[in-house]
Image: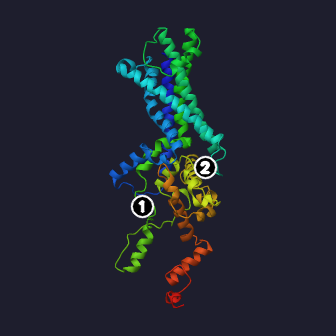
């Protein structure tokens, strides 16, 4: 009974802390401006099923796709086993699903063990790719200190959890074969049964190993659950809503600014009367000037670096990294949220996403080619953030680079980006 009470307290505490942290992230996302992404629901469901559930964009890198599939399927299916562990912990039972499922239970446990081995293999391969092979896309100016350690922590935690799971099953299986106490015969153990020869023969030691691994496994999972909101691994939850609300229009299509569109309409049609709107800011200077979808993108970023690895500006040595744009946006809106918690909603720290996090050199290095949005496995759109920040620089500060200001002047005066007037446009044909 004491064990059940302790487990209930641990479980309730973990759920409370996770809910609180998720609530803060939801609050931070909703600090962004409103944007309507409720149209074409059928198409959005298909996009989510194809990209998030079906992992359709992972296939472009086959090795990573197969290894990621192991972890993804393992995470989803092994959670069924976690449900049994939670119920056993609450009710003090042993393998509560075994009698209800009958022969299917052996199939489930056997499948979980095989998946656990595949997850272990994938984690080891991913660790080797990051730390031994040192793939270029896992490096970069933004992938130092915490982001670099975070990726390794996740893989090491998953290895520990899967190891504890297999050791727990091995000790359980051996106790079952000895018909010890309440360890009834339940389940098939194709992997962990191979480990029994390495375990001690005394039942008291086996029970200690089984109980220790049981507690380590479930407490580790609850701790990992609370680690997610602080980690790039949070994408396992946000990938689904993020792909659902992703942009359905062609990638190259830019949306008009409503306030500017109304002014142009009023110039062309004197009878047009725009609806009165509160004066706002053109473009985005800080994270709160972006839309909630931009901020959801930032929290969904997996930091995989596929966007940066295909960015032509980054490849040619420019400062721009689309991954850094997303990480900076996430860090800035998280900072704003913390300031609100500590100092109140009206607190201003005199910092902004522009210049304090993202430099103008990075923004103007972008070619707007959309390679980053095409490469992202969860449909994140770094280009939209870059364009909004450029709009602020041009329309609020009039601080575009000199070459662009010349082009703007030529368009205004000559109707073309070149310095020649309309009357001289066909002079070349006379020569």
Q: Position of residue 285 (x, y in %)?
A: 56, 62
Report whether residue 347 is seen.
no
Q: Position of residue 174 (x, y in %)?
A: 51, 13
Q: Residue at x 52, y 58 (%)?
A: 371
For the image shown, how many numbered marks are present on the structure?
A: 2
Whole-number angstrom distance, CA of label 1 to CA of label 2:
27 Å
Label 2 secondary element: helix
Check the picture and name the quadrant holding the C terminus: bottom right
Dot label at residue 250: 1
Mark 2, other Cα within 10 Å: few <14 / some 14–19 / many ≥20? some
Label 1 secondary element: loop
Mark 1, other Cα within 10 Å: few <14 / some 14–19 / many ≥20? few
Residue at label 2? Answer: 137
Q: Position of residue 300 (x, y in %)?
A: 50, 47
Q: Residue at x 45, y 60 (%)?
A: 251
Tell me which label, 1 or 2, sits earlier in the chain.
2
Q: Residue at x 48, y 50 (%)?
A: 296
- Front residue of this view, candidates 49 and 197: 197
Q: Relative to 351, is 70 on the left or the right? A: left
Dot label at residue 25: none
- Front residue of this view, candidates 272 and 165: 165
Q: How is the image coloured?
A: rainbow
Q: Are marks 1 and 2 in contact (CB under 8 Å)?
A: no
Judged from this view, the residue extending furthest toward the front is 431
Report whether residue 412 is seen.
yes
Q: Position of residue 212 (x, y in %)?
A: 56, 19
């Amino acid at each position: 009974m004491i064990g059940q009470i302790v487990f209930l307290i641990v479980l309730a505490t973990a759920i409370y802390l996770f809910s609180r942290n998720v609530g803060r992230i939801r609050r931070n996302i909703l600090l962004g401006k409103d944007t309507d992404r409720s149209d074409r629901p059928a198409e959005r469901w298909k996009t989510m099923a194809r990209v998030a559930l079906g992992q359709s964009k992972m296939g472009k890198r086959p090795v990573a796709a197969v290894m990621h599939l192991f972890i993804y399927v393992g995470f989803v299916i092994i959670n069924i086993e976690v449900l049994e562990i939670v119920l056993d912990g609450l009710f003090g039972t042993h393998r509560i699903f075994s009698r209800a499922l009958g022969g299917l239970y052996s199939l489930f446990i056997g499948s979980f063990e095989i998946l656990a081995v595949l997850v272990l293999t994938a984690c080891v391969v991913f660790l080797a790719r990051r730390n031994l092979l040192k793939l270029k896309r896992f490096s970069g100016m933004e992938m130092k200190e915490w982001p670099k350690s975070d990726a390794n922590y996740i893989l090491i935690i998953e290895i520990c959890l899967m190891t504890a799971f297999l050791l727990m099953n091995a000790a359980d299986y051996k106790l079952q074969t000895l018909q010890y106490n309440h360890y009834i015969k339940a389940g098939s153990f194709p992997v962990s049964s191979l480990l029994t020869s390495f375990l001690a023969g005394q039942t008291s030691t086996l029970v200690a190993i089984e109980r220790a691994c049981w507690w380590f496994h479930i407490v580790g999972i609850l701790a990992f659950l609370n680690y997610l909101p602080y980690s790039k691994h949070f994408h396992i939850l946000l990938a689904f809503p993020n792909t659902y609300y992703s942009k359905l229009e062609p990638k190259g299509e830019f949306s008009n600014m409503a306030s500017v569109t109304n002014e142009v309409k009023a110039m062309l049609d004197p009878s047009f009367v725009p609806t009165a709107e509160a004066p706002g800011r053109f473009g985005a200077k800080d994270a709160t000037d972006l839309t909630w979808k931009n901020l959801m993108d930032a929290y969904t970023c997996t930091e995989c670096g596929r966007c940066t690895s295909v960015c032509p500006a980054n490849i040619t040595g420019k400062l721009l990294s689309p991954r850094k744009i997303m990480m900076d946006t996430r860090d800035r809106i998280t900072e704003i949220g913390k300031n609100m918690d500590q100092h109140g909603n009206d607190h201003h720290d005199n910092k902004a996403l522009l210049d304090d996090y993202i430099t103008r050199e990075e923004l103007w290095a972008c070619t707007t080619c959309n390679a980053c949005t095409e490469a992202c496995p969860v449909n994140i759109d770094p280009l939209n953030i870059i364009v909004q920040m450029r709009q602020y620089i041009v329309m609020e500060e009039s601080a575009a680079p000199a070459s662009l200001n010349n082009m703007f002047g030529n368009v205004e005066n000559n109707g073309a980006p070149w310095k020649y007037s309309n009357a001289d446009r066909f002079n070349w044909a006379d020569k």
